[in-house]
Image (spheres, rainbow, N blue to C red):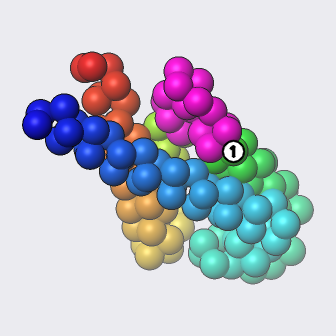
């Protein structure tokens, strides 16, 4: 009975991380292919800004890589990709918090909520794997 509960928890966590990986790929493709639109939607300004667009494309490439790595990984490789995603999400949350006062509040709140939520999911999964 206890093993069945553990398997159910593991399955739910895996489904959640797969969904997160798919969302990473979608966000990454959007940022990479349409950085100016992504910038406007994220509250990063709408004026032409090649440096910002380049940084968003880098972000997009990172998200595509993290999502694809997780989805294509198996066993220990998948666990490693979950850790890489956790590290990125924690750093994104810190960066969002450091942006307070210089970016619109709604933009900071959205970034911190999304990256913080992803970090929490990743941390719970990594902690579960470490404890096992």
Judging depth in this view, the residue of 110 and 22 nearest the camera is 22
* Main secondary structure found in the magenta portion: helix
Is residue 64 shown to the viewer in this render? yes
Q: Is residue 73 left or right of residue 57?
A: left
Q: Is residue 83 above or below residue 130?
A: below
| Count of all numbered marks drawn on residues in the image | 1
- Residue drawn at (37%, 55%) of the image: 117
Confirm whether the magenta stretch covers residue 80.
yes
- Residue drawn at (82%, 71%) of the image: 34
Q: Position of residue 114 (x, y in %)?
A: 44, 60
Q: Position of residue 48 (x, y in %)?
A: 86, 74
Q: Is residue 64 left or right of residue 76?
A: right
Q: Is residue 132 left or right of residue 79?
A: left
Q: Is residue 130 left or right of residue 30?
A: left
Q: Is residue 18 above or below residue 130?
A: below
Which corner quadrant of the image does residue 50 belong to? bottom right
Q: Is residue 28 above or below residue 61?
A: below
- Residue drawn at (62%, 44%) of the image: 71
């Amino acid at each position: 009975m206890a093993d069945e509960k553990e398997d159910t928890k593991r399955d739910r966590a895996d489904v959640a991380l797969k969904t997160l990986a798919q969302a990473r790929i979608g966000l990454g493709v959007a940022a990479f292919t349409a950085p100016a639109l992504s910038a406007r939607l994220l509250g990063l300004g709408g004026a032409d800004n090649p440096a910002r667009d380049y940084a968003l494309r880098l972000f997009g490439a990172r998200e595509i890589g993290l999502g694809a790595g997780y989805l294509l990984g198996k066993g220990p490789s998948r666990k490693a990709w979950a850790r890489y995603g956790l590290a990125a999400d924690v750093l994104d949350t810190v960066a969002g918090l450091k942006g307070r006062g210089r970016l619109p509040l709604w933009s900071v709140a959205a970034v911190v909520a999304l990256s913080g939520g992803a970090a929490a999911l990743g941390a719970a999964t990594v902690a579960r794997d470490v404890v096992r």
